[in-house]
Image (tube, rainbow, N blue to C red):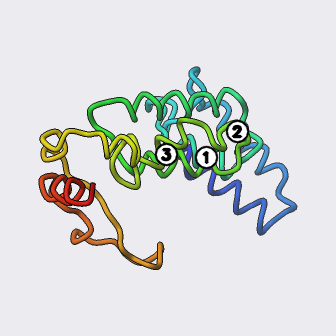
Amino acid sequence: MTSSEETAWSIAVLKEVLQKEEDAIGRGCGYLDKTRHVSGGWGQTKRDIPRIPTTVLVCELVPELADKRAIDWISQEWEKDLESSVQLSYKAGFFLLAAGNKKEWIGSDLVEKTIEYLVGYFGGASALRKADPKTLSNRRFKWDSAKDPIQPKNLRNWILGNDFARIVTDNA
C-alpha cells in the first residue's frame, strides 16, 4: 500500500526527471483522485482523515490537483486550527507554503494572522501594546534577534511572558 504523500512525490519526480512517463503519472494522479476525501483534502491513505500537511504537499507536488475544493479545504482547516486552543506551527508553515502562490490568499487576513502567530504575539504589535501586563505574563513569547533569517533558532529566542511584559511596559 502506498500513501498519498509518497505518490505525490513520485509523480513530481517522474515529471521532473523522466518526462516521458505519462502513463505512470496518469495512474498516480488517478490514485490520488481516488484517495481524496470528500471534503477536498488528503490523508495518508483513503482510511486516514485529511490532514493539512498531506493536502498541501499533494497540491504543491501535483499542482493540477490543487483545485478550488483543495484550496478551500486547506484554508478552512487552518483557520479552525488557528482558532483552537492548540496551534501547531508546522501546520502554519504548510499553510503558508500553499498560500505562497495563490492570488486569493496574498495579503488575506488569514495569511496575516498566520504570520503574526509564527512571528510572536498573536494580534500584532498594536494588540501587544494594548495588552494588560498580567495577561502577557501568563504566556511565552518568541523573539528573534538574528540578522540572518535562515540562522538556526534555539531556546534562547524564547522569553518568559512576565519578562516580555516588563520589557514592553518599560519601552512604552
What residue is drawn where x is 43% and y is 48%?
116
- Gap in Å between the C-alphas at discs 1 and 2? 9 Å
Q: Residue furthest right?
A: 20
The answer to whether the residues at label 1 and label 2 have Cβ atoms under 8 Å apart is: yes
Q: Which residue is mark 3?
A: 53
Looking at the image, residue 1 lies above or below residue 149: above
Amino acid type shown at disc 2: Ala
Q: For residue 166, which quarter of the picture?
A: bottom left
Q: Residues within 10 Å of mark 2 (few under 14, many from 20)?
A: many
SS under mark 1? helix
SS under mark 2? loop
**Marks 3, 1: nearer the viewer:** 1
Depth check: give the residue in front, 107 or 104.
107
What residue is drawn where x is 33% and y is 71%?
153
In the drawing, what numbered circle is on residue 87? none
Depth check: give the residue in front, 117 or 152.
117
What residue is drawn where x is 12% and y is 41%?
134
Looking at the image, residue 171 lies above or below residue 73: below
Amino acid type shown at disc 3: Pro
Q: Which residue is mark 2?
A: 66
Amino acid type shown at disc 1: Ala
